[in-house]
């Protein structure tokens, strides 16, 4: 990553322009062409640095259900497990923890029945026997931005 990539990532974390041509506007701010910004975004997505670009919504206010899941995954199968989990569009976060339940991820879906279905699919595709399903009881929203410059 170069300085422009870092500045681009800083900008799109919380200040993504809501305009007719956001990538052109980002290019103006970064002294690049719209095509250059689009090429960078595509590359950063392909490299896994950007997972998704989209809005964040209060899922409960629009009728969705959220849950935190935890799984105990052997070190040699973590990559496979994470790859399966990350294919689900409802997974918003996925991270490794220093705990016997070492992979934690959040899931958003229309209802708990859908989440249960997806968890069963993940277990089937990965061979994991148990994934803890810890539904949200209270929502805490915090803003996290990573300064990459």
Image (tube, rainbow, N blue to C red):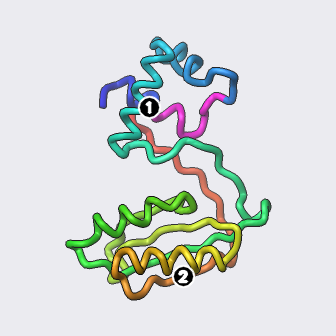
Q: Determine which of the numbered discs, if any, sits on residue 21 in the image.
A: none
Viewer-closest of 101 and 109: 109
Q: Is residue 14 magenta?
A: yes
Quickly name the residue at label 2: 133
Q: Is residue 7 above or below residue 135?
A: above
Q: Position of residue 97 (x, y in %)?
A: 36, 71
Magenta span: predominant SS is helix
Q: What residue appears at the point 38 percent right and 87 percent down from the top-left corner?
A: 129
Up-down relation of residue 32 to residue 80 (above or below): above
Up-down: is 104 above or below 23? below
Q: Which residues are magenta?
A: 9-17
Instruction: Count neighbours of disc 2 (C-alpha within 10 A) and say few if under 14, some if 14 to 19, many if 20 or more.
Output: some
Q: Quarter-wise, where is residue 46 in the image? A: top left
Asked whether residue 6 appears in the rendered view, the answer is yes
If you read the primary sequence from the N terminus, does the residue marked by circle 2 or circle 1 appear first?
1
In screen coordinates, is 112 left or right of 9?
right
Q: Mark yes or no: residue 149 visible.
A: no
Q: Residues within 10 Å of mark 1 (few under 14, many from 20)?
A: some
> Could you tell me which residue is drawn at 49 percent across and 84 percent down?
132
Return the mark for residue 41.
Answer: 1
């Amino acid at each position: 990553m170069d300085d422009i990539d870092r500045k681009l990532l800083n900008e799109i974390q919380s200040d993504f322009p809501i305009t007719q041509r956001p990538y052109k506007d980002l290019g103006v701010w970064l002294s690049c062409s719209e095509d250059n910004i689009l090429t960078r975004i595509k590359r950063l997505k392909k490299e896994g640095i950007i997972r998704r670009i989209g809005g964040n919504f209060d899922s409960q206010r629009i009728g969705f259900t959220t849950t935190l899941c935890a799984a105990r995954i052997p070190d040699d199968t973590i990559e496979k497990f994470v790859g399966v989990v990350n294919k689900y569009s409802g997974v918003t976060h996925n991270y490794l923890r220093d705990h016997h339940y070492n992979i934690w991820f959040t899931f958003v879906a229309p209802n708990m029945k859908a989440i249960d279905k997806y968890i069963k699919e993940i277990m089937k595709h990965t061979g994991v026997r148990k994934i803890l399903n810890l539904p949200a009881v209270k929502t805490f929203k915090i803003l996290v931005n990573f300064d990459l410059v």
